[in-house]
Every structure is written in C-alpha cells, then in structure tokens.
Image (cartoon, coloured by chain):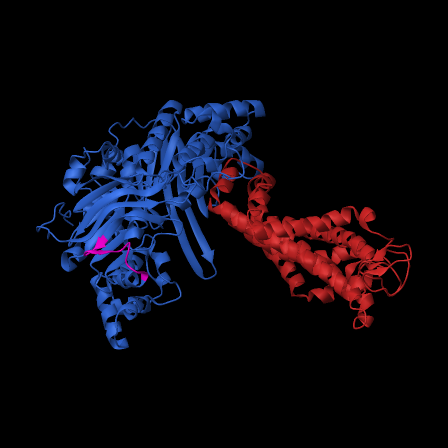
C-alpha cells in the first residue's frame, strides 16, 4: 500500500506513439463556442500515462474521440493532424481507421456497465474482440480470454468468463472492459474517466492496475479525468484543458507543485484537502436531530434486504455531520428515512423537541418544514416546467408565508445564494449545474428549516464550482445557525465541511466521532481503508 | 404551443397539420361549403361530375337515394370530428386520471386499477363495442362509452408508466418534503411533465377513434340514419360498389386522409418532444 511513484522510474523512449498537432474541431452551429478543441498539440510516448484534466465542456472527451478516429455526428475536424506512428488518422481511409480501432488504439469507457452487453457472457465479449481482429481457433480464443482476465487481477477468471455483467461488481466490470481493450495488445490505450463511476476503494485498485499494465506492456495511456487526486496517483505527465485549449502540459510533479497557468492554479486550489476543519465548537445543549435505532428492511418475497441496520446518531444545533460511505452503504436510505420520504421499519427520529418519526397526516405535513433537503442532481431536482422564483416562493408559502411575503422571501433568498434578481422569472434550463444547486439551496432554506440534509449535493459539479457551493453552504450555515447533515462519498469533501464524521458500510454505522479524530486516528479498519484509498493522498496541494 | 412550433420544423408535420386544418375548416363551415342539403333527395345514382337539375354539378356523384355525395361528405366531416373528439376526450379524462392515481400511489391502488385495465384490454375491442351498442342502442353517447372502454385502458397504461418515471424525480421528493399535498404534487409537479408525450398520443388516438367511428357506421352500429357519416355511407354503397365505386371510395379516402394527417402530426410532436428532452 505504498504510494505510487510520481515520476517514472525509467527514462522514457524518445519515439512518440501519438503526435497531435494544431488540432481544431468544430462544434455544430448554436453551440456555446465555435470550436470544441482549439489548436491542441501534444505527444504521447511509449510507456507513459498522460492525464488530460479539465472540467466538463473543456473538450477532453472530443479530443479522445478524434484520436479514435470517430468524432461524434455534427462535429468536424477542421485543421490539424493526429499521427499514430507517423500515419495521419484524420486523412486515412475509414477502412484503415477501423483496423486501428480496438487493435492498435483501444478505449476504456467511463460506465463499465454500459460498455458491456448485458445479454452476453463477459468471456464471449472478450473473445469477440479477438475474433474481429485476428484468426484463431475457439480453444485459443478461450485461453487468451482467460489469460487477459487474469492479467487484470480478476479473481477466478474461469468463473468470471462464464458470468453475465450483472453478476459482477462495478469494479469487476471495469476490469473486464480493460481486458477487452488489452485484447490485441494495443500501443495506445485511451481511458475516458475510467474510475469516476467507481467507489473510492475500487478506484484505488483500478488505478494501481493501470500503472502496472503500463509498466509491463509499455502502452501509451491517454487518461482523461477531472480529479487531480487521480492525476497525482497515476500520471507521468499531465495536460490541462480549458474551453478547448490545452493551457498547460508538463511532468506531473512540476504541474502539481508549480503550476504556471492561472487556470491550473485555480483548479488545484479548488481540490478539497483531506484535512479536517480546524475549529471544533463545543458540543452542548439538546440535539437538533437525533436518530435512534433506525432500521430499514426491504422484504421482497423470500429475500430480505437490510438497507439500514440499527443506526443511532445525534447532532447538536449549528453543527455539521458528514456521513461518508460508498455505494450501497445505506447513506441515501438514511437520508430518505430522516426526511420521511420512506417509512422506517423501526427506530425513532427526533427533530428538536418533536418526535418527527411518529407524526402522520396533517401534523407530519406541518412539521416537514423543520427538515429540508438539498438534492444530488442539479438537473433532476428542479421541476423544468416551473420558473425559479415560484419554485422558491412555493416552498415559502408552504412554510407559512402569505403569497406576497413568499415572493419577497424568494427574492431575498436568490440574492443570498448569489444569483441575480432576473433569475426569478427564468426556467431552470437556463442555469448551469452550479447555479441550479444554488437554487436548490435557496428552496431548502425558504421554509426556515432547523436541519438541512444535503445528499451528495456537490458530487455532480466540477471541482471549481464545487468549491464555490461548499463555501456558500458554510457561509449560510454560520449566518443562519443551521444544523447540517452532509452526505457524501468523498472523504476529502466531508473533511472540509464536517465537525463530526459518521462512516457507513453495508447499512451499518461503523465509526462516528469528531472529524479530527476520525480522520487522524481512525479506529475502524474500514475507515482506515477509505482514507488509504483516497486518490493522491501522497500529494498535498499547497 | 412551443411544442407545436418545434414540431412544424419537420415538413411531414406541416403536411399533417395542413390536412387536419382542411378537415377542421370543412367541418366548421359545412353549411357554407356544401353545395346541397345532405339529406335531400335530388337525383339517384349520378356519376361524379354529372350535371344537377339546378344547373350545378354533382362533383362526387349521388347515392342510391339521390343525395349529393360531396355535401354528405362535408357534413360527415362534422360528425366524425365531433364524435371522435368527444370520445377521445372522455377516454383521456378517465385514462389520465386513473393513470395519475395508480402511478403516484402505486401499491394496492395500482394493482386494482391495472387489473381492471388489463381485464378491459383482454376483451376483444370490437365485441365490446357491439355488446355496448346493441344493448343500449346506437347513439352518440353510446359511441363515446364504447370508445371510452376501448381506449381508456391504453391511455391509462401510458400515463401510469410516464407518472411512475416522473414520480422518482428529485423535484417530486422535494415537494413531498415541503409538505405539499398529494393532489398538489400530482397536479403541480407530475402532470405538467407528462403532458408532452400524452399530446402526441392524443393526436394519434383521435385518428384511431375516427376509424372506429367509421367502422361502427359501416357495421350499422354508428349514429342512427340519416345522419351523414362516412362509415355508413360506405356501407350503403357497398352493394353496388362494382358498378358505382364512387359511393364507397370517397368516404374511405376521407377516413384514410384524416388518419394520415393526424399520424403525421403525432410523429412530428413526438420527435419535437424528444428534442426538447435532449436540450
């Protein structure tokens, strides 16, 4: 478990595998800019991992599709060359490009589940790649597929070979996709956010696999990511993209520790630090929210699924509790039970001096304003049919204000979360993800809640926007004295905002305590594993 | 309206709307357009284009009873559009309401409603129509009831599926955590987000209903005579269709044309709705 080396251990060979020069890719008319990629030039060498970092819309995925010789419909390569070992992918005939794809240049996608055909056994899918590009007997193909699966450290390759994708975990599926990409031993491997759909502990394993494969097979890997932690973990060199331009490229250590371009500096400054919030206010007074022996069991015929098992927590007024866990840990179930979107199987929920868990009917509706929620997906949490002002004003009306007062309150809240007054009459579709999340925050605050529950509320945002939204939440909390439950899969984000941290795993609360203690001296083995798996922990941004 | 504007970017949808608009115009202004009284006997079995006693022409000929086919077709447009609109609206009112309740509450409500809908759907539709109309007599109301029983379960299933999808959105959860009532959640948050696909289906179903009314008329189960109605016109002419095909052909062409117009428009709306979702 020693951190991966930040610099390559052996000198790089001089011959570039891939040379991109002055690449311009045009977007269709009506897009927010003319060119998806503008004047991009770089080289990818044998046996190196080059990370391309950028926020959404920076053109990094378009760049990778151009190298695969398959830009999306509506896009066009206007200028420039993409040389693979001296041959220009842009101008070569389609038949030759097809021979390169999957054979000499292979791709690993973001969503492993979506990249595999759910109706075909994974072994057969690996063999299909072999069948497409080379003549071989069924026996040879099976042997080759098994050895490929084994090379990605999948346990029991023979069993995996005969499994369907749904029988495997996300991490296992991604290993299968990587095995497929490696089938023809390609010279260039393009990986588009290959670990961002995975849990942090699985991500750490897959990142290790990438480094190992590159050292053994000397591939050139173009690794696209938005996460500087991942860059610190795997990259030999790193290129930073902003609005279609490559603003900086260099050795990883140099770019991370001494960024030249202001945009790179801004991105690095926005990376959440895995260090605890220094001040810890004293815990006194009655708890603002208290969950006791909360459980949720789904009974589906014979099957019994324990989504949440006997969780007890309490949090004093004005504090923040970070609830951390991977997918399937029960953290979202906890959120749904706490706001009573889903009924608990057993246990009690108290908010202030109200027994919130046992209310029903009109009393429940009236008490709902005490706990409000900020949702994960900024695109799904605002009704596209309503205007922003009325969305917030409606919440205020339900909180007990008259309609004129509610409109005033909505206007105040818009300015409080940093949006212009014109936002009132616009529809959600006219706002960016970060702005929509601000609207969601304003809506949650409109009812003057005692407790706010934020469920992964920054995980869909770019890192610089994430930083702004976290700052907004912290400012509002100190102004309004709200008690905050902050659910996240990212320990680094939890560390930034939390006074207390609760770690969950498979429906159980495994560790709960002051943030400093949990982060610095974790007691439970799983917390230690989570902390160890955080990408780029060896590198601390300055 | 924005949806319609978006749909009209496709030439096929423009053609569809134009066809529907012509039918609508004809039915609204039937008394001014029709050259003769549709119920009056003038001269039997005239071929299309024949001269009329008053110096005019029977452009589409006359039928067995000597009534002008063009005028009957024009008044028939009224009958078809009026009753298919009422019947489709009734089917939608029942189907959307039931679908909204079943999709929102799920559980027992859904089980019971889905069972009812499936029972109705598993019944041969034509047999259902014939049973209803032969037991209660041929009238506009009974056509509405018959078509309602045939179409409402389909509308119910479409609405239910759409509602179940929207029900899981976070803005619905947000409304519930704000203490919004069930009715308000259904009407404010869910209904506006399922209307677009329903409108596309409404257009198509209007066409199906027009065909159904034609078929019922053809089988003698439609509106009681002498109301001009395309289906019964075709039925009256069928005995002499070999010698005088015009009595059958024109009503059939009219039904097909109306259906074509509505389905082109529906396709356009469906495509436009998909584009809206994407942007």
The quarter of the rendered structure image containing the N terminus of chain B is: top right
In this rendering, the answer to whether B122 lies above or below A486 is below
Residue drawn at point x = 15 percent, y = 57 percent: A218
Chain identifier matching the red colour in the rendered picture: B
Is residue A440 visible in the rendered structure shown here?
A: yes
Q: Quadrant of residue A485?
A: top left
**How many labels were placed on the picture?**
0
Q: Give the percent coordinates (x, y) of residue A208.
A: 20, 53
In this rendering, the answer to whether A404 lies above or below A469 is above
Q: Give the percent coordinates (x, y) of residue A136.
A: 25, 75
In this rendering, the answer to whether A188 lies above or below A53 is below
Magenta residues, start to end: A83-94
Q: Give the percent coordinates (x, y) of residue A374.
A: 42, 36
Instruction: Identify which residue, A373 or A250, lies in the foreground.
Output: A250
Horizontal side of B120 relative to A517 (left or right) equals right
Horizontal side of A258 relative to B36 (left or right) equals left
Is residue B168 visible in the rendered structure shown here?
A: no
Instruction: Identify which residue, A427 or B53, lies in the foreground.
Output: B53
Residue B73 among those drawn in magenta: no
Residue A93 among those drawn in magenta: yes
Instruction: Identify which residue, B260 or A354, lies in the foreground.
Output: B260
Instruction: Identify which residue, A423 or A161, lies in the foreground.
Output: A423
Chain identifier matching the blue colour in the rendered picture: A
Residue drawn at point x = 71 percent, y = 56 percent: B148
Residue drawn at point x = 80 percent, y = 57 percent: B70
Q: Quadrant of residue B146?
A: bottom right
Q: Give the percent coordinates (x, y) of residue A409.
A: 50, 24
Horizontal side of A199 relative to B3 (left or right) equals left
């Amino acid at each position: 478990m020693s951190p991966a080396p930040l610099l390559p251990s052996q000198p790089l060979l001089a011959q570039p595998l891939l040379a991109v020069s002055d690449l311009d890719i045009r977007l269709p008319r009506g897009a927010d800019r003319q060119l998806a990629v503008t004047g991009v030039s770089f080289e990818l060498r044998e046996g190196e991992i080059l990370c391309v970092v950028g926020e959404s819309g920076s053109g990094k995925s378009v760049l990778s599709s151009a190298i695969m010789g398959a830009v999306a419909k509506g896009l066009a390569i206007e200028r420039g060359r993409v040389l693979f070992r001296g041959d220009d992918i842009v101008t070569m005939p389609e038949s030759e490009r097809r021979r390169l794809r999957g054979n000499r240049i292979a791709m690993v996608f973001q969503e492993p589940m979506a990249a595999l055909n759910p109706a075909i056994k994974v072994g057969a899918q690996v063999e299909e790649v072999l069948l497409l590009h080379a003549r071989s007997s069924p026996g040879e193909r099976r042997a080759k597929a098994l050895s490929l699966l084994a090379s990605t450290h999948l346990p029991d390759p023979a069993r995996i070979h005969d499994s369907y994708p749904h029988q495997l975990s996300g991490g296992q599926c991604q290993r299968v996709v990587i095995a497929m990409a490696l089938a023809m031993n390609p010279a260039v491997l393009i990986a588009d956010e290959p670990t961002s759909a995975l849990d942090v502990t699985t991500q750490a394993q897959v990142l290790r696999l990438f480094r190992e494969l590159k050292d053994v097979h000397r591939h050139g890997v173009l690794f696209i990511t938005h996460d500087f932690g991942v860059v610190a973990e795997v990259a030999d060199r790193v290129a930073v993209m902003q609005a279609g331009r490559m603003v900086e490229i260099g050795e990883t250590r140099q770019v991370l520790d001494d960024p030249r371009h202001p945009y790179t500096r801004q991105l690095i400054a926005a990376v959440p630090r895995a260090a605890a919030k220094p001040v810890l206010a004293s815990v006194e007074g009655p708890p603002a929210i208290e969950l006791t022996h909360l459980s949720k069991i789904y009974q589906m015929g014979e099957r019994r699924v324990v989504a949440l098992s006997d969780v007890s927590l309490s949090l004093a007024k004005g504090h923040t509790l970070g609830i951390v866990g991977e997918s399937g840990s029960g953290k979202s179930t906890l959120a749904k039970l706490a706001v009573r979107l889903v009924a608990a199987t057993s246990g009690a929920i108290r908010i202030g001096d109200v027994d919130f868990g046992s209310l029903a009917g009109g009393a429940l509706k009236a008490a709902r304003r005490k706990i409000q929620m900020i949702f994960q997906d900024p695109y799904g949490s605002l009704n596209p049919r309503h205007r922003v002002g009325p969305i917030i004003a409606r919440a205020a009306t339900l909180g007990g204000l008259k309609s004129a007062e509610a409109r005033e309150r909505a206007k105040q809240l818009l300015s409080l979360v940093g949006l212009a007054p014109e936002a009132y009459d616009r529809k959600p579709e006219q706002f960016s993800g970060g702005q929509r999340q601000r609207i969601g925050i304003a809506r949650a605050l409109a009812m003057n809640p005692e407790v706010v529950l934020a469920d992964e509320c920054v995980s869909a945002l770019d890192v610089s926007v994430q930083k702004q939204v976290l700052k907004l939440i912290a400012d509002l909390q100190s102004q309004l004295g709200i008690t905050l439950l902050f659910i996240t899969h990212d320990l680094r984000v939890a560390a930034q905002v939390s006074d207390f941290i609760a770690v969950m795993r498979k429906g159980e609360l495994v560790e709960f305590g002051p943030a400093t203690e949990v982060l610095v001296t974790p007691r439970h083995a799983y917390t230690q594993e989570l902390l160890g798996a955080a990408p780029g922990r060896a590198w601390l941004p300055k | 309206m924005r949806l319609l504007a978006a749909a009209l970017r496709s030439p096929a949808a423009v053609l569809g709307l134009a066809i529907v608009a012509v039918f609508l115009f004809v039915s609204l202004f039937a008394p001014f357009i029709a050259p003769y009284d549709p119920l009056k006997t003038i001269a039997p079995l005239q071929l299309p284009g024949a001269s009329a006693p008053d110096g005019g022409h029977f452009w589409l000929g006359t039928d067995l009873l000597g009534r002008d086919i063009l005028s009957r077709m024009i008044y028939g447009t009224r009958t078809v559009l009026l009753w298919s609109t009422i019947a489709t609206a009734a089917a939608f009112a029942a189907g959307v309401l039931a679908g909204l309740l079943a999709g929102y509450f799920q559980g027992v409500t859904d089980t019971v409603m889905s069972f009812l809908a499936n029972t109705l759907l598993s019944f041969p539709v034509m047999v259902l129509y014939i049973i209803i109309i032969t037991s209660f007599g041929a009238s506009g109301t009974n056509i509405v009831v018959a078509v309602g029983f045939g179409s409402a379960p389909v509308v119910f299933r479409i609405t239910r599926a759409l509602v179940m999808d929207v029900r899981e959105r976070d803005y619905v959860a947000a409304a519930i955590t704000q203490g919004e009532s069930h009715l308000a959640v259904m009407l404010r948050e869910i209904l506006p987000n399922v209307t677009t696909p329903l409108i596309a289906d409404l257009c198509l179903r209007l066409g199906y209903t027009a065909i159904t009314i034609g078929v019922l008329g053809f089988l003698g189960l439609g509106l009681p005579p002498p109301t001009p109605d395309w289906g019964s016109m075709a039925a009256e002419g069928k005995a002499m269709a070999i010698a005088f095909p015009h009595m059958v052909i024109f009503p059939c062409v009219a039904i097909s044309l109306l259906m074509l117009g509505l389905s082109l428009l529906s396709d356009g709306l469906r495509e436009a709705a998909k584009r809206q979702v994407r942007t």
